[in-house]
Image (cartoon, rainbow, N blue to C red):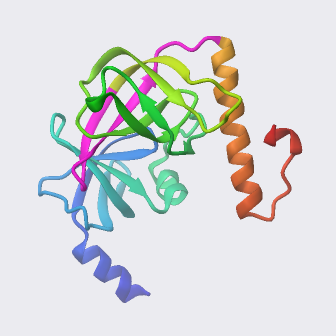
Amino acid sequence: MLNKLKTALSFAPTVEFVDYEDGLLTVKCKKALSFKNTSVKLKTSYGTILALVLVESYDASQEVYRLKLLEHDTVLDKLDIDRREHPRLPKVVRVTSQYFPGFAGTTEDISLSGVRVETTGPLEVGPDITLSIELDDPQLPPLRVSADVAWTGQKVDGRFQSGLRFVYLENELQRTIRRYIDSRLALEKKLHTLEEVDPAELM
């Protein structure tokens, strides 16, 4: 075990912690990171942490990489990050907007505060775009929302992912999104764990 750890440390590139947002770790690296990298030495004010990751995208405008943590809770505990964010639902649904290349994309995840989307080209970072989210629920019409584009980065397959933050959600829209996320997360828990699920959560 110790030898495996030493090997991982010797091959893992060193990156500098920038932020944790939209469910992804944002880092800078003096050398180009490969999308094949599976571990990094994460430099923080608390010291250096070995983190198992997937390199999601590179943001050329900010010169940062965004990484998905494979040991999410362990690393965030070490970083002492306040995780009082809205639950994020990993979900792929269609999104349309006149501001998207080809006018359409798909979500990577959904939360009450925003969505992470995948598109064929980069989005322009800036405020106040409108989009329509087509949830996979026949009882719900497409949700029309306004959002700011916080960041965008290119993925290994040439497509782009972007973090969108909802600008203002009316109370009814908030309740609709919250119910949708809660019911889908409860369904996932029921399918993949032995925990008891409150039937009300599936409504």
Quadrant in the picture for residue 14: bottom left
Residue at the image position 81 percent from the left and 40 percent from the top: 201
What residue appears at the point 31 percent right and 81 percent down from the top-left corner? 6
Indicate the position of residue 19 as horizontal and vertical percent values: 35, 40
Direction left: furthest residue: 31
- Visible in this render: residue 49? no
Drawn side of residue 49 relative to residue 83, left or right: left
Report the side of 2 relative to 57 (left or right): right
Q: In front: 83, or 66?
A: 66
Can see residue 93?
yes
- Residue placed most toward the observer, 101 or 129: 101
Residue 68: x and y, percent?
40, 54
The span shown in magenta is 150-170
Task: Please count the marks in the image.
Answer: 0
Relative to 33, residue 45 above or below: above
Q: In the rendering, at what x and y percent does residue 56 appear? A: 32, 52
User: As displayed, is residue 56 above or below residue 134?
Assistant: below
**Residue nearest the viewer, comparing 180 with 2:** 180
- Left/right of residue 74 with respect to residue 153 in the rendered view: right
Please report the residue visible at 37 percent of the width from the left and 80 percent of the height from the top.
Answer: 5
The quadrant of the rendering that contains the N terminus is: bottom left
Residue 185 pos. (x, y %): 68, 46
Q: Quadrant of the C terminus?
A: top right
Depth check: give the residue in front, 146 or 195: 146
Residue pictured at 71% horizontal, 38% vertical: 182
Q: Is the magenta stretch mostly helix, strand or loop?
A: strand
Q: Does the magenta stretch include residue 161?
A: yes
Report if residue 124 lies within the magenta region: no
